Amino acid sequence: MIILHKKRILACILGTMLVIAGILNYNDKSLEVSGDILDNEAESTFVTNMKENIETIDVDSSNLSDSYFVSARREKNDTYDKQVKYQEEILYNEKSSETIKTAALNRINTIVDKMSKEMAIEKLLEAKGFSEVLAIINDDNVNVIVKTMEELSISQVAQIQSIVMREANVKADSIHVITKN
């Protein structure tokens, strides 16, 4: 039983790492790090400084629409990270019962599944020619924000709905397409 839980935990962690790696690849940002990081405090300072530099680059080098998508994606990912960390705290707490640990693991699996579906929707829509897309899956609907300079055609909306219905397993009336220019 415990081995099964360890395998599920490992699968969740690997899934989360895969999603994060995909997001990092998606942003096409590469950083080269030279030198050794000697301790946790130095590492924390280094990472904080790098985050400040990246945020500055994002704001300075992109227009308002791009910064909207960058900040919205960052906020979404931060929220998911906090949710997963909270569930992991419950999962690794010695005082948590097996029922509570199982529920926490199920919530982690749900979060990772939602993140994977959102990323798949975003990537598929970008492959169809939409320049910037943000998908947000809620309990009862899916919001898809699309960057466009003009109104979407009926065929484009149908294309978006088709991909979202297939990937998120929802009905068309649960999909809300929002344009952002």
Image: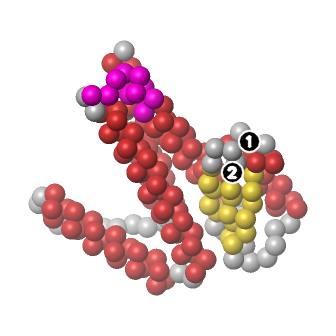
Q: In the current view of this chain or complex, which residue is farthest to the right?
A: 154
In the picture, measured across the screen, residue 113 lies left or right of residue 104, that is right
Residue at the image position 52 percent from the left and 69 percent from the top = 70
Q: Is residue 101 magenta?
A: yes
Decide which of tag 1 and tag 2 comes sooner along the chain. Answer: 2
Instruction: Bin the neighbour count of mark 1 within 10 Å (Cα to Cα): few under 14, some 14-19, many 20 and up.
Output: some
Residue that label 2 marks: 142
What are the residue bounds of the magenta stretch?
95-104
The relative height of residue 181 versus residue 17 in the rendered view (above or below) is below
Residue 76 circle label = none
**Disc 1, disc 2: CB below 8 Å?**
yes
The relative height of residue 56 versus residue 133 in the rendered view (above or below) is below
Residue that label 1 marks: 170
Quadrant where the C terminus is found in the figure? bottom right
The relative height of residue 58 versus residue 33 in the rendered view (above or below) is below
The foreground one among 21 and 114 is 114
Residue at the image position 57 percent from the left and 82 percent from the top = 63
Residue 104, image x, y percentages? 42, 33
Amino acid on which the number 2 mark rests in the picture: Val
What secondary structure do most residues of the magenta stretch adopt? helix
Q: Secondary structure at mark 2?
A: strand
Q: Secondary structure at mark 1?
A: loop
Q: Is residue 38 magenta?
A: no
Q: Is residue 141 visible?
A: yes
Amino acid on which the number 1 mark rests in the picture: Val
Residue at the image position 27 percent from the left and 65 percent from the top = 47
Q: Looking at the rendering, which quadrant does residue 158 occupy?
A: bottom right
Q: In the current view of this chain or complex, which residue is farthest to the left?
A: 38
In the picture, measured across the screen, residue 164 lies left or right of residue 102, that is right
